[in-house]
Image: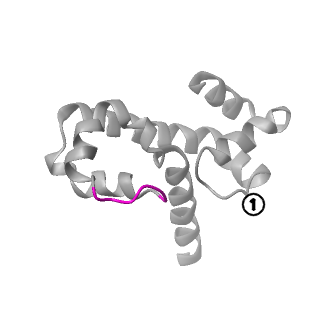
């Protein structure tokens, strides 16, 4: 049972790093917050996102709303493409849209729900 829990948590981390780790998703709504709280943080490997999370209590309403939107996308992605990602792109390292690119390159093999998710997010 512990193995299944750890495996599930691992998959959640992989999915969250794929969709939410791109600071560009936050750039407009969180630009001032990133400059204020994360200016000294080195970019890459989700460090800006981690910084925003650590300063969540002090973030602007616009940035908090954007974070909520991105979290919702994580959930949608997990529901829609989790099995396809495991089956078709398990060897792809998350980051810079690599998983989404992998899934798009294998569109003919994707489930209908994953295809719908990807098309609505383009």
On screen, residue 36 versus residue 16, left or right, reads left
Seen as rendered, the residue at the extreme right is 108
Q: Main secondary structure of the magenta part?
A: loop
Q: Which residue is mark 1?
A: 91
On screen, residue 2 versus residue 62, left or right, reads right
Q: Residues within 10 Å of mark 1 (few under 14, many from 20)?
A: few
Looking at the rendering, the stretch of residues picked out in magenta corresponds to 40-45
Label 1: element kind: loop
Seen as rendered, the residue at the extreme left is 58
Q: Is residue 91 above or below residue 78?
A: below
Seen as rendered, the residue at the extreme bottom is 2
Q: Is residue 43 magenta?
A: yes
Q: In the rendering, at what x and y percent does residue 23 appear?
A: 42, 44
Question: Along the line of sight, which residue is nearer the eye, 106 or 109?
Answer: 106
Q: How is the image coloured?
A: one colour
Q: Residue at x 53, y 71 (%)?
A: 6
- State how many labels appear: 1
In the rendered image, the quadrant that contains the N terminus is bottom right
In the rendered image, the quadrant that contains the C terminus is top right
Q: Is residue 63 above or below residue 39?
A: above
Q: Is residue 24 magenta?
A: no
Q: In the rendering, at what x and y percent does residue 17 appear?
A: 51, 53
């Amino acid at each position: 049972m512990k193995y299944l829990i750890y495996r599930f948590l691992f998959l959640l981390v992989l999915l969250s790093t794929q969709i939410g780790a791109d600071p560009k998703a936050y750039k407009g709504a969180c630009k001032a917050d990133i400059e204020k709280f994360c200016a000294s943080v080195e970019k890459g490997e989700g460090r800006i996102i981690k910084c925003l999370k650590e300063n969540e209590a002090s973030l602007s309403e616009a940035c908090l709303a954007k974070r909520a939107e991105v979290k919702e996308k994580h959930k949608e992605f997990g529901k829609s493409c989790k099995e396809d990602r495991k089956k078709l792109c398990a060897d792809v390292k998350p980051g810079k849209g690599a998983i989404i690119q992998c899934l798009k390159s294998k569109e003919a093999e994707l489930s209908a729900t994953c295809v719908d998710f990807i098309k609505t997010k383009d």
